Image (cartoon, rainbow, N blue to C red):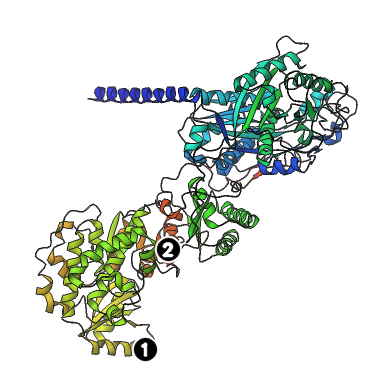
Amino acid sequence: MAEQEEIRTYLKRAVAEIDRLRDRLKAAEAGSGDPVAVIGCGCRLPGGVDSPAGLWRLVDEGRDAVGAFPDDRGWPLDELYSPDPDRSGTSTTTRGGFLSRPQDFDAGFFGITPREALAMDPQQRVLLEVAWEALERSRIDPAALRGTDTGVYAGVSWQDYGEAWWDDSRVEGHLVTGSATSVVSGRIAYLLGLEGPTLSVDTACSSSLVAIHLARQALRAGECDLALAGGVTVMATPRPFIGFSRQRGLAADGRCKAFADTADGMGMAEGAGLLVLERLSDARRHDHPVRAVLRGSAVNQDGASNGLTAPSGPAQQKVIRRALADAGLTPADVDVLEAHGTGTRLGDPIEAQAVLATYGRGRPPDRPLLLGSLKSNIGHTQAAAGVASVIKMLLAIQHGTVPRTLHVDRPSSYVDWDSGAVELLTGPQPWPDTGRPARAAVSSFGISGTNAHLVVEAAPPAGSPPAEPPHRDGAVPWLISARNAAALEAQGAVLAAYTEAHPGLHPADAAHDLATTRARLRHRAAVVAADRTRLLDALRALAEDRPHRHLVSGTAARKPGGTVFVFPGQGAQSWTAGRQLLHDSAVFREAFEACDRAMRPHTGRSLSDLFGDAATTAELERPELVQPLFFATSVALAALWRHHGVEPDLVIGHSQGEIAAAHVAGALTLDDAASLVALRDRALGRIAGTGGMVTLPLSAERAAELLSALHAALSVAAVNSPSSVVVAGPDDALEQLLDHCRTERIAAHRLPIRVAAHTGAVEAVRSDLLAATDLRPRKGRIPLHSTVTGELIDHQLLDAGYWYANVREPVRFDECVRSLLAAGYRHFVDLGPQPVLVPAITENHQAYRGGAPSPGEASPGAPSPGQAATVTVTGTLGLDADEPTSFLLSLAALWVAGAPVDWTPALPGTSALPADLPTYPFQRRGYWLAPGPGPARPSAPTPPDGGAPPSPDPTG
């Protein structure tokens, strides 16, 4: 048998693999004619640039990001500089383009221990965070990619971090992976669970452009469906400066004077950038933002040229022509070239002449190719240079402006600029208006001789008309999550700043993206608002860790636990509850009207009409209408919760609420439940006016002692919690009790009920209640825990005898709740028009835990910010005057606690964002294996939530 099962398993896997290969073949066939789209990007570059928007501000303002050597990496600055290019161990410059604190990293976010983070090359750390940011800007939840055929192509060159620490026992176990080139790409795939091709590419300064070329090919071949492609360089030591100083290749001031007559060498820099690539048809289908398409690309090699490190003009011309042929374009079809342009006297003239010989020929003189180089702003970012230039061109196409190239006194006299129609960008220009899509090319050349060329084209118009802007009426949820409390507060701050920076932003504009394109992490908050004022107030409250009526926050449980629907009974009436939902919610209205139709043979009156202005106070107080209305409202609220993905694992009902609970459990048909409600009301109507009910803030024991001493006709009708009971009896006895409570300052309260239910008084109508002989209970899907017996009950035992006991016997609500807590149920939803049972459930939980308040309990609203939601107790309505808002706040209370919620019905179908939403606010700390001001070999505690990489929350 075991052998047969093994064979079956093998065959299943084989069939699955065949299906997978068939899908890939179809994708490859379709992809051969399907352009590859850029749907998002991320970058970290000199000048404090930490986003594409930051890069655009830098180049648009014409800023120079070159600065002094960093003083926080342990470099021997006092000994490092010498103007003598032959002096060993020194640099001929003290300037370059540097990232701001590449040692800072949010290790805990990625589940990496401090010791491993310390041993990781900073290039791995920086690129990990950039990958997450690039995916978020692509409107993709990074955690949702786990198990997908997503590829990672990372250009990387220098790996000199940690070389001096191989004998340090505290980190040597991690230095192998920490310094391996392959792990720069592999760690991204590992931590995000990506299963597509994963390559680290080292062709020196052309690495990132080669990586993009390879990713494009893989997508077109069907080897992956999504790809991250780009590169990174972080100079952990000054060794690159020392080496190039010996070669006399550095500019003394650290600046790349691309194609300028004063060009005197390269300005070295560091940076990181990644593109998110997808086939255009897939991007359109998935509603991902299409920033541009990669029209063509090519890679080649100098071969046996005039030197290992010297560029080859003929090879550069060939790679340009191949890329244009791949794109199906002529040189005149390209508007702008973002050149390699390092500012060397050898390389720039060779590159310029190759450009003139290709792009400069055969194009109208009045429409020259515009030539520029990002290196003039930030320096030569080496393995990240190509992707940084691509991002610059994407932004230039988007903004319709070509930024200027800095540090050009005049075009290089070593170049015959009159030999072709090429213009060096010494000032910003509008993008040429050609009547066709804007196109730019990007060149990169590696010191090893590998050349790459890429053609980028403006995104084609979508085939279908633009989506309608989101519907702006009513409240919407902004769902926010983080790996720890500090990051959650930071999310509030950055989202508040984003909202303030875009005055036209409406809550509906961003709700869809926040709910569907961001990872569901354990620390959560939901802001529910219909207007900017409430939205901003709640976001600021989140940022400041203070409560707000439109904010729910908490921590999702690792194991969510079961969900219980709780149906209140008598004493919970609210005549107007549900009126707004009846108007606004089709789901609520459909369920309510079904109950109305089932009730009408018994009431002779439309329940829906009771919500109208024509309904009189007298009608609303008629007992034969009160309970049918309450039943219909509770059942409709249950339908609304289920429509939003919250399914009960079990139901309970208090007194008459058990009828609604039994119907929702599937034990009673709607007609049977309606008949039972009407039968009960008629029977109790016969003894109406003979007694009533009073709530007492006492334990069952103290209440029994009081009643025994006070009046024999009174008895305990319901035990709701350790300090809340309901007593019932004749009116005169209840008045005597109330007088005594006023004297003793006991906060007793009379309920608006004119029957001593759950006492011996009900025996007078026993025969009436047992008359439901045609009741046919059935086996439902959802368990029901009886508040009559205090145990789970077989649905088929819910016959007439049970429903008589439901009215006659005391309600054992406290016992029921505590047994459910012991069984592991963790989410309790009060389905009444007012959250009357929430305090009782909360107190039962406190008693179950030994009397201490639970840190995660919600009162009739939401858990306080920062609390851990071990048990969640929430109402449905009554949290806000606006019923849809109140419901969403209640829904949010479960979501922040980790219960499964489907937010789709509450979201606009589209988003209308004025700009990319802020990406995750990483909570960084320094890790650097070097002496000096930066933390050296710190022994740090494990960051919050460290241990496991983020993954899709199965409950969210």
Q: Indicate left or right for 936 with 904 as reference.
A: right
Q: Is residue 814 visible?
A: no
In the image shown, does 753 or 450 lie closer to the viewer? 450
Residue 754 image position (x, y, % from top left)? 24, 82
In the picture, the quarter occupied by the N terminus is top left
Question: Which quadrant of the view contains residue 627?
Answer: bottom left
Q: Amino acid at mark 1?
A: Arg
Q: Nearer the viewer, mark 1 or mark 2?
A: 2
Q: How many marks?
A: 2
Residue 679 picture location, percent across and down: 16, 71
User: Between residues 228 and 925, which one lies in front from this camera angle?
Assistant: 228
- Residue 529 visible in the current orientation: yes
Estimate the x, y position of residue 464 in percent, counting from the top left.
49, 40
Q: Position of residue 404 (x, y in %)?
A: 78, 36
Q: Secondary structure at mark 1?
A: helix
- Residue at 72 percent of width and 36 percent of height: 930
From this viewpoint, which residue is outermost toward the top? 304
Q: Identify residue type, mark 2.
A: Pro
Relative to 316, 111 lies left or right: left
Closer to the camera, 151 or 915? 915
The image quarter containing residue 953 is top left
Spatial CA distance of label 1 from label 2 is: 39 Å
Q: Which mark is residue 884?
A: 2
Q: Which residue is mark 1?
A: 742
Look at the numbered disc 2 and give the secondary structure of its residue.
helix
Label 2 neighbourhood size at 10 Å, few (<14), some (14-19), many (20+)? many
**Who's the residue at 59% across and 48% down the image?**
917
On screen, residue 235 above or below 399? above
The earlier-in-sequence mark between 1 and 2 is 1
